[in-house]
Amino acid sequence: MASLGERMKELKIDAKDMDYRELNEKIHEVLDENKDLEKLVLENVLGQRFIGNGVSRKDLTIIVNGVPGGDLGMFMKGPKVVVNGNADHAPGNTMDEGFVVIHGSSGDVTGHSMRGGKVYVQGNVGYRSGIHMKEYKYKFPVLVIGGAAKDFLGEYMAGGIILNLNMDQEDSENIEGRMIATGIHGGVIYVRGIVKSSQLGIAADIKEFTEEDVEKITPYIEEFCAEFGYSNEIKEKLINSKYTKIAPISSRPFQKLYTPDLR
Amino acid sequence: MCGIIGFMSRTGRLISGDRIATALNCLKERGNGEGSGYVGYGIYPDYKDDYAIHVFLDATKDYDKIRHEVEEVLVKYGYILKDEEIPTEEGIIKKEQVSWRFFYRFDEKYKSVEEDMMVDIVMDINAKIDGAFVFSSGKNMGVFKAAAWPLEVAEYFKIDQYKGFQWLSHARYPTNTKGWWGGAHPFNLLGWSVVHNGEITSYGANKRYVESFGYKCKLLTDTEVVAYLFDLLIRKHKIPVEYAMSALAPRFWDEIESMSEEDKKIHEAIRMTYGGATMNGPFGIVVGTQEGMAFMNGEVEEGNTMVGLTDRIKLRPLVAAEKDDLLFVSSEESAIRKICPELDRVWMPDAGRMVIAKLEKKI
């Protein structure tokens, strides 16, 4: 029995058959009543949306056991959310800061409009993952995908990094996917494996993958392997794999779309 | 956005209707209570080879007069084995329609063209008899739908008392038309049942196209045209389902460019011939299909199948999953796991490419 003086460090909520509004109200209530709470465990989660939505808090970990609904951690600022299961659409939607770790796959528009923070998905992600990600000064979103991504990866991207590891494939293989990074005008995408320019959307361009890029992605690979418990051997293999670097042709690709060059 | 979930037992195992209702209820947030519906395949074993015609009759005092008008049309071409009100539970939803069903068999002389006859009968009744609307016209199957929430419709029609090897369901969030009983999904014609999440923006073009083949689009909802396109392409024109699907969600021209010569010719021919069948706009559909469909290798497949398909640039979600003899297709994975927590495989089908579940033996 925790003594009255000592604040609760860890709490559990059973979300079984709970409507998402009720669950999210309960989460906010528990957080308000326990300022020093470090760990909140949600059991029997099944389809509830908006979990962790708008939570603004440092040093808090939310464990989600089950299959959360869409928009997990939307507008979130600070916490770490660990999902033991598959996530639905848009985990990390417009996230400001924090860390979403999905031990499974996730749906379409994973990391939609992220402004900061990190989303790491162990398995596959759906269409338009990383759409509208953007960076600003020290706000720098990172999306790391262990498995494969579907078409439109990084659509309209304006900042941050997408790292698509394609771990179920060799780095010498050609990856699938069309309309990759269509409309990109900021940020960079690293795809482990071979991408043909015909697979890119408009405004995207394949750039040279240099030593400097290896240094840039190594810390994320290390953290990814630590989070999901991959061996050193796998980590080294990923660090030394061949990547295709995709970045925008220019920061204003549609500049001349409506106004032909007047000069 | 609407919610869809459907599943099939590939070995034809009969499953009670309460499972699909529990699953659809998980997706109720995707609907707004303006319409929910279910279709069960294999639910009328006693009338396996006869038509089970479900008809909405406006719930006015002279609904029996409307029923009689429907009866008069039917008896011209065959015999009514049994007709009764579909059993419903009182006190759950306001009874805007009387739900009636006729078990019906065509006269011997129409047997060879009975499917075309049934399509014409359905079109006639829906067009000419005021206050009557045929919402299910297949064999050994039936649609149950109304303008209400998922569990309300399930309890109202007591679908837990039906057992079927394939169920499709839909929680509606109407975009183009007012929610009414007939506008709820699934939309059915013969063995085709369609549940659809999205918007067929090419509805006008598709409507004109199917109407040139005699179909009448009376329902004001775009889903209607999908069922007619399936009937036209697969039953009437006998196109193998894989090619029929690529008529509805055609390959991009740049994809066709990089195909082998033979595939290129086929896909070019499909796009040129069936341009009017191309479905544009965001959509996710699941279709319960007719018996005896032709397959790519030309061998006619016995038994029903279930097909899931999204638009080519994936503007609506669709998840597929498998467990032993069951194949599921759903808007969200959580609805599947609600009725089947442990799954052998979960995957996201490629955009514009169908997922198909086939019965291993004829029921």
Image (cartoon, grey):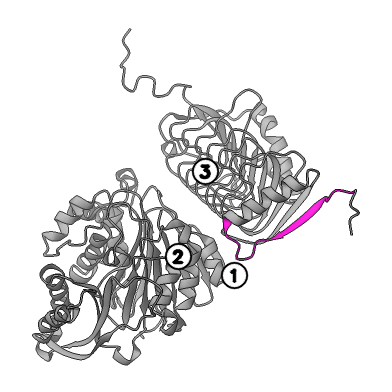
Can you tell which mark lies on residue A129? 3
* Residue appearing at x 48%, y 66% in the figure: B25
Mark 1 — on which chain does it sit? B
The residue nearer to you, when weighing A177 against B310, is B310
Amino acid type shown at disc 1? Pro
Can you tell which mark lies on residue B341? 1
Q: Which range is magenta?
A: A6-20
Amino acid type shown at disc 3? Ser
Is any part of residue A17 visible from this angle?
yes
Q: Which structural element holds mark 3?
A: loop
Amino acid type shown at disc 2? Val
Q: Which structural element holds mark 1?
A: loop
Q: In the rendered image, which residue does mark 2 sit on? A: B329
In magenta segment, residue B73? no
Q: In the rendered image of this protein, does residue A83 appear above or below residue B329?
A: above
Can you tell which mark lies on residue B296? none
